[in-house]
Image: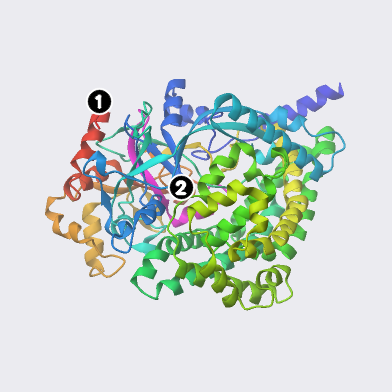
Amino acid sequence: MKKLLSLLILFSFLVSVPSAVADEGMWTFDNPPLKQWKEIYGFEPTKEWMEKVRLASVKVGGASGSFVSSDGLIVTNQHVAASALSRLSTPQKNLVRDGFYAVTIQDEVKIPNYEVTILVSYEDVTARVQSSVKAGASDTEAENQRKAEIANIEKESVASTGYRSEVFRLYNGGEYWLYRFKRYTDVRLVFAPEEQIAFFGGDYDNFTFPRHDLDVAFLRAYENDRPAATPHYFKWSLTGATQDEFVIVPGYPGSTARLLTVAQLEYQRDHGNPLQKRIWDIRREILESYSSRGEEQARQANDGIRSFRNSLKRLDGQQEGLLNPRQFAKKIAEENELLSAVNANPEMKRRYSSAWPQIAAAYKTLPRYAERIQFTNLAPSRLGTIASQIVRFAEETAKPSDGRYEEFRDARLAVFRNSVLASTPIFSEMEEYALTRWLEEAQKRLGDQDQFVIAALGGRTAKEVVKDAITNTKLADVSVRTAYLDGGAKAVSASSDPMIALARRIEPIYRELRKWNEENIVSVDVAAGERIAKARFAVYGKTLPPDANSQLRITFGRVAAYSEDTTLVPYKTTYYGLYDRALSFNEKFPWTLPERWKERKSLINLSVPLNFVYSADTIGGNSGSPVINRDAEFVGVNFDSNIQKLSNRYWYIEENEGSRAIGVHSAGILEALKNVYQADRLIEEIMSAREDRSKR
């Protein structure tokens, strides 16, 4: 009888609680929002449709892209490809500034140490991971047991399939999924426009609409020195996105925090976000100061400056959301509703109710350590980062795989080596300037007696330490890095390289802080988070998606205009608007036009759409995501969102509040390729792919 009563109470919760609303959610492919699609948009995809979308959606670095031909052609954003453009640039040939087009396939340029991946399969391993925890284990012991089992799962998967394999936590530990990835490590540059047209309006126009940006780039995946065979791809729509059209956006959204507790959100609002802002402001200012030294220094620092400015503007919007009493009150109400449901059921109360105060207690201890954690690294220096990675690699790989830091497990070492051995250009002057300023800032903020400061400086000035390390290190040579990785602990401990020595000195402090964080914050997050997830599943069912985690998701919405105060904002902009905005500012930077855009204005159909907005639930990492219609045709590429959407890291901002993602229109891309860049070969391949004709 008691069991029956509990079931009746639980059933009442399940039927009374609403699921995701409207266009909410970054859904996993194992649990797509089929109900919403059918009820709201009358769309019922087949399994074959879903498989095609998954296999045509590409991860490019920390962002997204998609195949648009059967010969490995990938479309993404210029700002996603910017790091590749920087790698291929020289003082004499600036591809970021001037753009690039491979007239023939032989002209496609290989990007060093670059890869793209697709998700080929996935498997629920929740039961195996959760059952690995032994009865009576502490939170720290339990987390170590989970990590050991995850390492075994990954290792077995690599051995049996040959695919890169990683286990990911979903629902804060409520589920664990094994993802297998196909890697393309030969990636070549096909086309990118000038940054000035890709980022027209610069930081002023960033996170706004109307916009006028041709933020697009084309890459190609190769295998065995030939264009890769990619039978799953999106055919290009000639008409592109239209008003009120239903669209779907598969991609790799970076991270959301919608399932955090109120205590965790309060920490982010009061401590985490303000500290992150200080760190990013410091690093932005360092690069901006360095860039003022000259044109070449500005070129070197450009990618980093743009990235930090973008991140800071997004962070400001997220923080505004947390500081909004009305929006934060919704999170409090949601948590109270779940807690009420848990506490109404004696068995659920016994199992789950302690999770919330446990997390709250843990996060009260974090502010004392947070600033030390943020500063105890050599992150502003590529050489410093490489040195720390090599030192850490040597120590970790001396252990069994299941006892290492996650990033050093056997199943992940190929990716790690690829990162360390990347032949990315290293600019010694910028390295010295940035690392010196960083260590000076750490000394100022942490104090002379801080362990990191003492270990890094050893009684010398930051300028003296960094000058020695940058001038005398050999780590710019990839062969030297390779020798350290191959030589392991013995080679690293015997090294007299001053940058390696610096990394060795700070490593114990880094490890001490990481251990504290894992034992006091991470292990609590996972243990308590798992109980909260189980409570949420029991009360609501699996009606909400997990937080984004830089892995493949699928979102949806409609192309739609919106109101901003008393102004109606159109769903699209055109090339007319691009030229009008340039002229309205007398072509003053950042509203200047590249020369070819002025010379070929008469060739452009100015009424063609350039950018458009839609209500799909996206966030950073969705840059480069394909926007497709119900026929799986490519109608545009996602590149930004408006300011109203920025707090969607913490909660879904509904369509009627003006929240919109922004894309580059497929017709606008074709118009530019044809009449501005005269990219006939690229256009021919796109058109041939529409007819399933291979054209290389």
Q: Which residue is mark 1?
A: 693
| Quarter of the figure with the N terminus | top right
Query: In this rendering, does residue 643 appear at all?
Result: yes
Locate residue 114: give its quadrant: top left
Which residue is pictured at 64% across the width and 48% down the height? Answer: 488
- Which secondary structure, mark 1? loop
The magenta stretch is 628-653
Q: Residue at x 29, y 34 (%)?
A: 236
In the picture, the quarter occupied by the C terminus is top left
Residue 318 in the image: state x and y as whole percent.
Answer: 55, 57
Residue beneath disc 2: 656
Q: Which mark is residue 317?
A: none
Where disc 2 sits, the SS reads helix
What colour scheme has been applied to the protein in the rendered image?
rainbow
Question: Is residue 268 found left or right of 637 in the rendered image?
Answer: right
- Is 13 contained in the magenta span? no
Q: Residues within 10 Å of mark 2 (few under 14, many from 20)?
A: few
Q: Is residue 130 left or right of residue 466?
A: right
